[in-house]
C-alpha cells in the first residue's frame, strides 16, 4: 500500500500567498522594532541542553561528541545567554529577533503548534515602569503596523499575587497549588485550601477574588483603596504608572488589567502581559519583566521583553489572506527565445514577476 506523506503533528505547510503574507507581516513587524531602536540579532537553532535546563517540551538531540543539545523552545533564553557573555559591557541594549522555535505541545490542549515563528524584542539593562511601558507600546505598534486591529492587552504584575501569598506564610508547595488553581479559575478548590490557612480575612477574600479581578483601570482603583501588603501595593502603583505612560503613546484603549495573572512566577519578576486577538484562542503576543533570568548565565542584568507569535497572529488575520496560488505578472511566449529572455529581464528590473514559456515536449 502506498503511504501518504503527512506533516508531523504540530507542524504545517505554508503555501504561496499565505507564505508571502507571512513574510510581509514579519517584515513590517521587524521594521517597526527597528524604528524604536531595536536591532536584529540571530542565535543558533540548537543550544546546549543546559541553556533550557528547566524548560518543558524540549526537542533533544545528541551530537557526534555525545553532548545533549536542544532545539530552542523560545528566543529569550538564547538572548539571555548572549547578553551575559557578549553584551554585558554594552548596556543598555535593545535587541530584536525573528526565528522559528520548537516545543512539544500538550496534546490535551488543541490548537497548539510544535513549530512556530516568534518575532520579539528584549530591552536589556534598563529598569523601571517607563521601559516596561515602552516594550508594550512597541509590541502594540508592531501589531498595528502588521494590519492587526481587533486585539486587547491584558496587563498584570506577578508581585501582586506574590505579595498576597507572602502574607500567608504558606509552604512553596501550597503556594504553587493555589497558583495552579488561580490559573484554572477554580474558586471552589481555592476556598477549600484556604480554610485551613491562618490569614487575615480581607487578604483571604482578595485571594479568592483573584480569578475575577480583571477589567479596566477601575480594578486598580478599587484595589488601591484596600489594605494590602507593601509588595502588592507597589505592584499596583507600577501598573498605574505603566498605564499612564501607555496613554502618552495613545494606547490606553488597548489595555485591560488581570490582577490574577500569575503564570511563570519563577520566570517573571514584575510586569507581565498577554495580547489576545479576536478569533484566536491563545495569546498572539506576550512578555514581561525578568530581572533575574540572565543571572543564570553569571551576570545580573535587568531585562524586559516581548514576543509576537506570528502563526497565531495570522490565524487572527486569516480573513485578509488569499489562499489561492499567486500568478506571475507577465507570461511570455513565442518562437524568439532570445527576445523573450531579454524582455523578461527588463520587466523583472521593473519589479514584475515574469514567466517565460519554452517549448514543451511534443510541441
Image (spheres, helix red, strand yellow):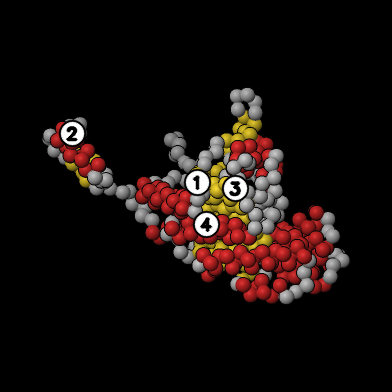
Position of 33 compared to 232: left or right?
left
Residue plotted at (82% across, 72% down) = 201
Can the viewer see residue 345?
Answer: yes
Of residues 103 and 44, which is closer to you in this image?
Answer: 44
Residue plotted at (60% across, 24% down) = 64
Residue tagged 2:
359
Residue tagged 4:
139
Quarter of the image where one finds residue 131: bottom right
Element type at mark 1? strand
Question: Residue 39: which numbered mark, if any?
Answer: 1
Residue plotted at (27% across, 45% down) = 351
Of residues 79 and 148, which is closer to you in this image?
Answer: 79
Badge 3 or badge 2: first in the primary sequence: 3
* Mark 3: few/some/many CA within 10 Å (<14, 14-19, 20+): some
Distance CA(mark 3)–CA(mark 2): 60 Å
Residue plotted at (68% across, 57% down) = 270
- The mark closer to the camera, 4 or 3, is 3
Question: Residue 92: which numbered mark, if any?
Answer: 3
Can the viewer see residue 11?
Answer: no
Distance CA(mark 1)–CA(mark 2): 48 Å
Residue 244 lies, in percent from the top left, at: 59, 68
- The mark closer to the camera, 3 or 2, is 3
Badge 4 or badge 3: first in the primary sequence: 3
The N terminus sits in image quarter: top left
- The mark closer to the camera, 1 or 2, is 1
Amino acid at each position: 500500500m502506498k503511504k501518504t506523506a503527512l506533516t508531523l503533528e504540530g507542524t504545517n505547510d505554508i503555501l504561496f500567498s499565505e507564505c508571502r503574507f507571512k513574510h510581509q507581516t514579519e517584515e513590517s513587524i521587524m521594521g517597526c522594532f527597528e524604528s524604536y531602536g531595536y536591532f536584529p540579532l540571530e542565535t543558533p537553532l540548537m543550544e546546549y541542553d543546559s541553556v533550557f535546563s528547566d524548560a518543558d517540551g524540549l526537542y533533544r538531540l545528541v551530537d557526534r561528541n555525545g553532548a545533549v543539545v536542544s532545539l530552542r523552545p523560545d528566543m529569550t533564553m538564547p538572548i539571555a545567554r548572549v547578553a551575559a557573555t557578549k553584551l554585558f559591557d554594552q548596556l543598555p541594549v535593545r535587541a530584536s529577533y525573528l526565528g522559528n522555535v520548537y516545543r512539544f505541545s500538550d496534546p490535551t490542549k488543541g490548537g497548539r503548534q510544535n513549530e512556530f515563528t516568534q518575532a520579539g524584542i528584549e530591552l536589556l539593562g534598563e529598569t523601571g515602569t517607563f521601559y516596561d511601558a515602552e516594550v508594550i507600546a512597541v509590541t502594540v505598534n508592531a501589531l498595528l503596523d502588521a494590519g492587526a486591529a481587533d486585539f486587547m492587552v491584558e496587563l498584570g504584575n506577578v508581585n501582586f499575587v506574590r505579595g498576597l501569598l507572602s502574607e500567608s506564610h504558606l509552604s512553596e508547595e501550597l503556594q504553587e497549588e493555589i497558583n495552579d488553581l488561580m490559573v484554572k479559575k477554580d474558586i471552589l478548590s481555592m476556598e477549600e485550601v484556604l480554610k485551613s490557612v491562618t490569614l487575615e480575612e480581607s487578604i483571604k477574600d482578595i485571594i479568592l477574588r483573584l480569578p475575577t479581578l480583571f477589567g479596566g483601570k477601575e480594578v486598580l482603583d478599587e484595589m488601591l483603596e484596600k489594605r494590602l501588603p507593601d509588595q502588592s501595593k507597589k505592584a499596583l502603583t507600577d501598573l498605574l504608572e505603566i498605564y499612564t505612560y501607555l496613554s502618552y503613546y495613545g494606547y490606553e484603549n488597548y489595555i485591560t488589567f488581570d490582577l490574577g495573572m500569575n503564570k511563570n512566577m519563577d520566570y517573571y519578576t514584575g510586569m507581565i502581559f498577554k495580547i489576545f486577538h479576536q478569533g484566536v484562542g491563545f495569546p498572539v503576543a506576550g512578555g514581561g519583566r525578568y530581572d533575574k533570568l540572565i543571572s543564570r548565565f553569571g551576570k545580573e542584568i535587568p531585562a524586559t521583553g516581548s514576543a509576537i507569535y506570528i502563526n497565531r497572529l495570522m490565524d487572527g488575520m486569516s480573513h485578509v489572506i488569499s489562499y489561492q496560488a499567486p500568478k506571475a505578472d507577465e507570461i511570455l511566449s513565442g518562437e524568439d527565445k532570445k527576445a523573450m529572455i531579454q524582455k523578461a529581464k527588463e520587466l523583472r528590473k521593473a519589479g514584475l514577476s515574469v514567466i517565460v514559456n519554452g517549448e514543451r515536449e511534443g510541441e
